[in-house]
Amino acid sequence: MSRRRLAPVGLLLGLSSLGCAAAAAGGSGGSGGSGTGTGGSTSTGGTGNAIVMNDPSTYPQNAGSSAAFPYPQGHALPNCSFPAYNTDTVETAYTNWKAKFFVGNTVIRPENGNDTVSEGIGYGMLIGVFMNDQPMFDALWSYAKAHPSGKGDGLMTWCIAGGSGSCSGPNSATDGDEDIAYSLLMASRQWSGGTYANDAMTQIKAIMAHDVSGGILEGGDGFNNTNEIDPSYFTPSYYRAFAAYDTADSAAWMSLIDKVYSILQAASGSDGLVPNWVSQNGAGITVSNSMVDPYFGYDACRIPFRIAMDYCLNGEQRAQTYAQLISTFYASKATTSSLAAINDGYTTTGQNPTGTLGDYAAGMAFLGPAGVGAMGAGDSQASLRDLSYKTIKALTTSPAMNTSGTFTYFHASWGVLSLMAMSGNFWDMTQ
């Protein structure tokens, strides 16, 4: 089954103050602790600027909620520091995202016939649980359950066509499966009542049974090929949480962590430019599109976020090693005030691939995870981290965020998730 990114379909919009651009493409020690922030309080960010934590009562999604972790948290990550953030910025980004993409109790891709993909449901559920939007979370989980994979395993089908008949195929996609499972596990800690804990276990068990084969993370429950691997599905911080919760399969989850790091190391090269699709030995391969699959592009751009979080949360040195590689490459393309020279695709040696991949300025799906990766790389990449935050802030909070055709759901989703991670509002609630 081939299901990954479509070619760029939209506009390039300049970002005046930072010289950054958003490519429209189809498609994936801070302040505070585990408690809530204090109204109007400030503390010091990684560069000596003020972090602003506003009172939870100022955010409407908290009204009447008994959440264990109402927004905002500013939850300290044990091994990473944050840029100077303002919780109002993250709130505005979330509300802008929700207004544009949460439509009819699902997450739509307006640029792709208003279809829905399971990864979008996963993104929305992650945003919902960490931003304390339980009504949106519950609506998305209900939608996922109403659109099961054809395999009958309880996982969600990867795509539900919009009015244009934009996609087809009955199987699941592992990235959506993982994000849905993790968000359910977090929901079991965030909100009392409901069946979140049992639902999380069902999803976690299904992933191990149907998305993992011979210790290899496959592309979905119908993929049946352990030598066609998407490294952007590697989420080792999730697997640690799954191992602690699913004790019967704990050893298998921990073994999977070692396997994904082994493949990632083999695929990373000298710059961390991992191909979108690889074989077990880390070599770039073609699954459905030779102009895209063997290169660092619209799948692989997510890797810095997913891997760096394992260092930020768990101190995994293999994660930091990767984060340092990709952050050094991104920093080499940046200036002190702009990320505009970072493109939306590279060969594994940092060149422009044949075709349109890499011909556009990178959008939020690249630049947001770059900032999270920079957190994982350590203080040497604080400038890249801070510039990523400022860039994503400008893109997600501007009026253009709600303009039809300006941003695709994929860029916007990763922009919001990255702001959440860079402000201590994405972590492991089970720890």
Image (cartoon, rainbow, N blue to C red):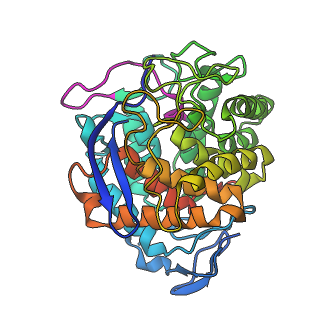
Residue at x 47%, y 62% (from the top left corner): 132
Q: Position of residue 11 (x, y in %)?
A: 26, 47
Viewer-closest of 345 and 367: 345
Asked if one can make out residue 164 in the rendered structure from this viewpoint, the answer is: yes
Q: Position of residue 153 (x, y in %)?
A: 52, 21
Question: Is 340 on the left or on the right of 74, as rendered?
Answer: left
Viewer-closest of 170 and 278: 278
Residue at x 52%, y 65% (from the top left corner): 387
Q: Position of residue 263 (x, y in %)?
A: 71, 28
Quarter of the figure that contains the N terminus = top left
Q: Position of residue 93 (x, y in %)?
A: 39, 63
Q: Which residues are magenta?
A: 160-177
87 lies above or below 244: below
140 lies above or below 390: above
Quarter of the figure that contains the C terminus = bottom right
Asked if one can make out residue 69 in the rendered structure from this viewpoint, the answer is: no
Question: Is 284 on the left or on the right of 344, as rendered?
Answer: right
- Is residue 175 within the magenta segment? yes
